[in-house]
Image (tube, grey):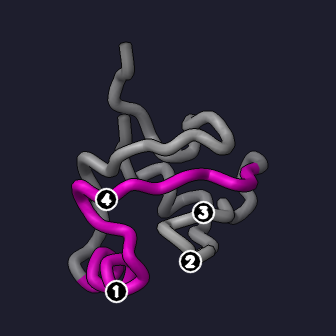
Amino acid sequence: MSRIHPLTESDLMTDVTVVRMKLEANEQEKLSQLGLHQGGTVRVLQRALNEPLLLAIGDARIGVNYETAQKIFVY
């Protein structure tokens, strides 16, 4: 059974669904334009402590800094 957790704790190469983003509105808007939004599916391709995460959103690849990723909750 899945539990809600920060994106930084997601397993690599596993699809997860975004359920909450505790971000400033402008930061949330920027990520939404890149395809990262509540209800969307994302996969963590690469991750290291305090380093940006490489994410796959559909066919796109984006980088999200570690602090931001800690505020994105998924299951």
Between disc 3 and disc 4, whose residue precedes?
4
What is the distance, in whole Å, between disc 2 and disc 3 at their CAs?
8 Å
Give left or right: position of 40 versus 46.
left
| Helix, strand or loop under label 3 | strand
Image quarter where the C terminus lies is: top left
Three-letter residue code for mark 4: Gly
Quadrant hosting residue 56:
bottom right
Residue under numbered circle 2 = 60
Residue for point 42% across, 82% down: 34
Task: Give the residue number, with chain letter if any, for mark 4.
Answer: 40
In this rendering, the answer to whether 33 lies above or below 69 is below
Provide the residue designation for mark 3: 55
Distance between mark 3 and mark 4 Cα atoms = 12 Å
Nearer mark to the viewer, of 1 and 4: 4
State which tag comes first along the sequence, 1 or 4: 1
- Dividing the picture into quarters, in which one does residue 63 lie? bottom right
**Which stretch appears magenta?**
26-47
Name the amino acid, label 2: Ala
Q: Residue at x 60, y 63 (%)?
A: 55
Tag 3 or tag 2, which sits nearer the N-term? 3
Counting the numbered discs, the total is: 4
Q: Residues within 10 Å of mark 2 (few under 14, many from 20)?
A: few
- Residue 41 sits inside the magenta stretch: yes
Q: Determine whether, in the image, residue 53 is placed left or right of residue 30.
A: right
Secondary structure beneath label 2: strand
Residue 33 marker: 1
- Identify the amino acid type marked 1: Gln
In the rendered view of the protein, which quadrant contains the N terminus? top left
Looking at marks 3 and 1 on the same chain, the residue that comes earlier in the sequence is marked by 1
Q: Give the image location of residue 54, x and y in percent.
A: 67, 64
Q: Is 42 inside the magenta-drawn segment?
A: yes
The Cα–Cα distance between marks 3 and 1, rounded to whole angstroms, is 14 Å
